[in-house]
Amino acid sequence: MALDTRLQQFKTKMELSSETFVRELSGIRAGRATVALLEPIKVEAYGSILQMSQVGTITANDPRLLTVSVWDKDIVKNVEAAIRGSGANLNPTVDGQTVRVPIPPLSDERRRELSKLAAKYAEDAKIAVRNIRREAMECVKHLEKDDGISEDESKRLSDAVQELTDNYSKQIEAHLAMKQHDIMQI
């Protein structure tokens, strides 16, 4: 039973790596407005650094416009400055307590850059999954050597770890293909 628990732990680690990758992909803009574009931006407010979602409500009104309804009018300028300084090439405008963020269309060059960035994130995620696989295989070898599990049990665990690795690598590739398709669409 302890062996299956260890296998579940490695599966959980691979799942977390995959989820992190999907979260990173959501921050890459694909030419249309998405709330995930502004969520990672940090805003200085109340003497600390907060995420955008902690200072206002972010909405995607249409495919080319995001709005942030800031809860406190005293930090509207900070929100505007944070969006402007985020490096996302966005030019927000302030209307009372609402910050409007028009999403400019992507050039072909910028689409290629974003596609490469998505591929880099995918490769990092696959490396993380392979490192977890390596850790799991070392654990299996250790169990066979020191704890006396049978060769058949060792082979079963090794095959299960490899199957998990293959499944998560395929998931990562599928998410990458979908994101690259979204990015390259005109």
Image (cartoon, rainbow, N blue to C red):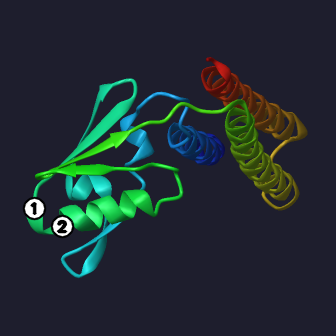
Task: Give the farthest residue toward the bottom.
Answer: 47
Q: Position of residue 97 (x, y in %)?
A: 12, 52
Residue type for callout 1: Asp
**150 relative position to 124: left or right:** right
For residue 31, side relative to residue 107 (left or right): left
Percent coordinates x, y for residue 45 in the rendering: 23, 72
User: Measuring 28% from the left and 49% from the top, which residue is drawn there?
Assistant: 93
On the rendered structure, is 172 left or right of 61?
right
Image quarter (top left, top right, bottom left or bottom right) of the C terminus: top right
- Write the residue at 81% across / 34% down: 162
To which residue does mark 2 refer? 75
Q: Secondary structure at mark 2?
A: helix
Q: CA distance from mark 2 to mark 1?
A: 6 Å
Q: Is residue 80 above or below residue 4?
A: below
Quarter of the figure with residue 145: bottom right
Residue 72 bears which disc, if any?
A: 1
Comparing 109 with 171, the one in front is 109
Q: Is residue 59 above or below residue 128?
A: above
Give the SS element for disc 1.
loop
Asked if the residue at tag 1 contacts the one at tag 2, i.e. Cβ–Cβ closer than 8 Å, the answer is yes
Circle 2 crowding by C-alpha within 10 Å: few under 14, some 14–19, many from 20: some
